[in-house]
Image (spheres, rainbow, N blue to C red):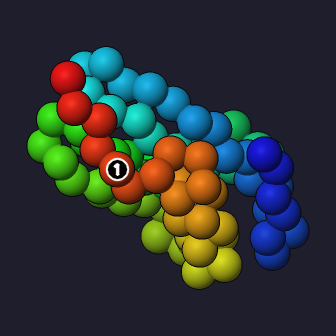
Amino acid sequence: MSITVDNINYKIIIASDIVRDGLGIELWDNDRNEIVAEIFRNDNLKKIQISTFRTDLPLEILEKLINEFDKEIGRNFQCE
């Protein structure tokens, strides 16, 4: 999924992480080809965490990332 906010082209990618035991959704700056934020659902720890790798992210893009996380991944933890 691609989104443009404040003339910056972003893409959202769903990623599985076996080591951390969960699913995440990543926000990438397409122009710089770098990850700028991640929401991760850790099924082992039963926690959802957000990490940002840039300090100047618009609230609008974070809201879209959270909405996409809820739609595509959800907040229900997976049990073994």
**Vertical placement of 22 versus 45: above or below?**
above
Amino acid type shown at disc 1 = Asn
Rendered location of residue 76, percent (x, y): 34, 50
Depth check: give the residue in front, 49 or 52. 49
Tell me which corner region of the image, top left, top right, bottom left or bottom right, holds residue 52. Answer: bottom left
Depth check: give the residue in front, 10 or 79. 79
* 40 to the left or right of 67: left
Depth check: give the residue in front, 34 or 15. 15
Residue, far top: 18
Crowd tier of the residue under label 1, counting other residues whose Cα lies within 10 Å: few below 14, some 14–19, many 20 or above? few
- Count the labels in the image: 1
Q: Residue at x 29, y 55 (%)?
A: 48
Res 21 visible:
yes
The residue where tag 1 is placed is: 76
* 54 to the left or right of 57: left
Tell me which corner region of the image, top left, top right, bottom left or bottom right, holds residue 56. Answer: bottom right
Res 36 visible:
no
Rendered location of residue 42, percent (x, y): 26, 41
Q: Residue at x 60, y 55 (%)?
A: 71
Q: Residue at x 52, y 59 (%)?
A: 70
**Vertical placement of 6 versus 72: above or below?**
below
Residue, far bottom: 59
Tell me which corner region of the image, top left, top right, bottom left or bottom right, holds residue 1. Answer: top right
Q: Residue at x 50, y 45 (%)?
A: 73
Rendered location of residue 33, percent (x, y): 69, 37
